[in-house]
Image (tube, rainbow, N blue to C red):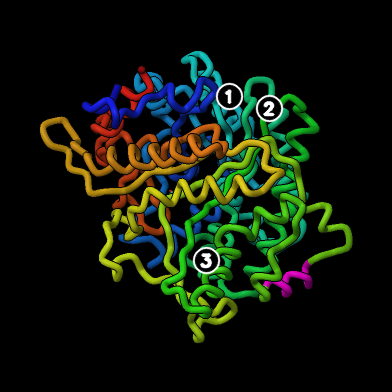
Amino acid sequence: MINDSNSDRLAREQFGRDFKWGVSTAAYQIEGAHDVDGKGLSIWDVFTSRKGKVKKGQHGNVACDFYNCFKGDIQLVQDLGIPNFRFSISWSRVLPTGTNTVNQKGIDYYNRIIDYCLESGIEPWVTLYHWDLPQELELKGGWTNREVVDWFSEYAALCVKSFGDRVTNWMVMNEPAVFTGAGYFFGIHAPGRTGMKNFLPAIHHATLSMAAGGKVVKQLAPQANVGTTFSCSYVEPATSGARDLAAAKRADALLNRLFLEPILGLGYPVDDLPVLKKLEKYMRSGDEERMSFDFDFIGIQNYTREIVTSSFFTPYIGARLVAAKKRKVPLTEMGWEVYPEAIYQMIKKFNSYSNIKKLIITENGAAFPDILKDGRVADEKRKKYIEENLRQVLRAQKEGFSVDGYFVWTLTDNFEWAEGYHPRFGLIYVDFETQQRVVKDSGLWYKALLQQ
Ligand code: NOJ
């Protein structure tokens, strides 16, 4: 029992015996060792070396040094009693140029991680693509080049052949809407490309690759539990006026439906976001079929809600987000609104698709300013954020919506992409000078919840 009053009680068993509890990470954000043991460069290695791309010029060259510290960190996962550990494979560590030549040292490294998880009684959950495309492939057009579907399939096959005897749970992609939007339209993430001419082909090729990747995993490991993960935000119109309602619908199509619906066999949400008609230019006959795949589970990653208003001046979508800081609402260190009900709304929304077999929250968490004082990080806000979000998960379950797991983002403080090391999301504090780890109060709280 975690709370004082019985009526307010949050307990592990309320979520059901088969509910998957976990914690999520990603290679580039934690591993460091960006150029050792034969690893090739990824687009994030290159992007972070360019001036002005990441706050304070920070990069993931060392990050949490998970490459060398993985045993200690996996031991912490075990100490916290977290049964499932999600991490990603760095494509250019196992295939330095993206295709053909395998780097055995990279394969050995992931074997060590997987074996150590299993020895520690922790189930590995592996993401194939968490945004770090090999730079050699970017030089050939990256996600804008349709050949990426073959490159990605080859990489997926290598991973399943190398690790599939011990790894059951796979996630093909992480948040395609974010890596295509931020990386290929806004240019604020790697590889820093901009505009529709990059965004549209990247969307279509990411969709095809996601489906192709799913098929490869299932063919080579029929027993595998294969999923893929999507970012999602609860979208509400700024007013009940017709224009804002229509703008919110377009934003919802872009943020929440763009990659999900083609995978489910429904095609791109063109009716609600007409600009997507432009995707036709990149489509070949048979692509509707090729875009869909029957995943064993869908991972959703929710952090906040967005308020949307109609905006005549915003090209393509005619909508814009009303920044949370202008709305006088509680904020995280990322400037995102703290709005736990969003996760409940997302569970409901994803439950409305009849062909989603299982739904897992593969990321949820928050960055707050943490202070290490006398060996302790009293991160009450993060604890409360996770607790409130879990209450909303429970609320959805009680109303009959299915949701089969919850993974906290993230294990340790790490490299938060364009924001650098400032926003701290971890259950565990990291002193990046010394690589010292300190379990935060939120981590102890999660442990206590899981121990019941
Ligand atoms: C989603 C991404 O998958 C992860 O890499 C990122 O750090 C978190 N959200 C927080 O922004």
Examine the residues drawn in magenta and state their main secondary structure. helix
Segment tinted magenta in the rendering: 276-282
Return the residue nearer the eye: 236 or 29: 236
Q: CA distance from mark 1 to mark 2?
A: 8 Å
Give coordinates of residue 233: x percent, y percent.
48, 56
Q: CA distance from mark 1 to mark 3?
A: 32 Å
Vertical relation: 201 (above or below) 28: below
Q: Amino acid at mark 2?
A: Ser
Q: Residue at x 46, y 74 (%)?
A: 240
Label 2: element kind: helix
Q: Residue at x 47, y 57 (%)?
A: 234
- For the residues bearing labels 3 and 2, Cβ distance under 8 angstroms: no
Q: Residue at x 64, y 71 (%)?
A: 273
Q: Considering only order in the chain, which callout, 2 or 1, is on the residue closer to the N terminus?
A: 1
Q: Amino acid at mark 3?
A: Gly
Q: Is mark 3 within 8 Å of ligand 1?
A: no
Residue 108 is drawn in which quadrant?
top right
Circle 1 packing at 10 Å, graded few (<14), some (14-19), many (20+), is some
- Verify whether residue 253 appears in magenta: no
Q: Residue at x 38, y 38 (%)?
A: 391
| Residue 29 makes an appearance in the image | yes
Give coordinates of residue 64: x percent, y percent.
37, 38
Determine the residue located farthest toward the bottom in the rendered image: 313
Label 1: element kind: helix
Q: Amino acid at mark 1?
A: Asn
Query: To which residue does mark 1 refer?
Result: 111
Give coordinates of residue 109: x percent, y percent.
54, 28
Q: Considering only order in the chain, which callout, 2 or 3, is on the residue closer to the N terminus?
A: 2
Residue 410 is drawn in which quadrant?
top left
407 vs 263, left or right, is left
Vertical relation: 249 (above or below) 407: below
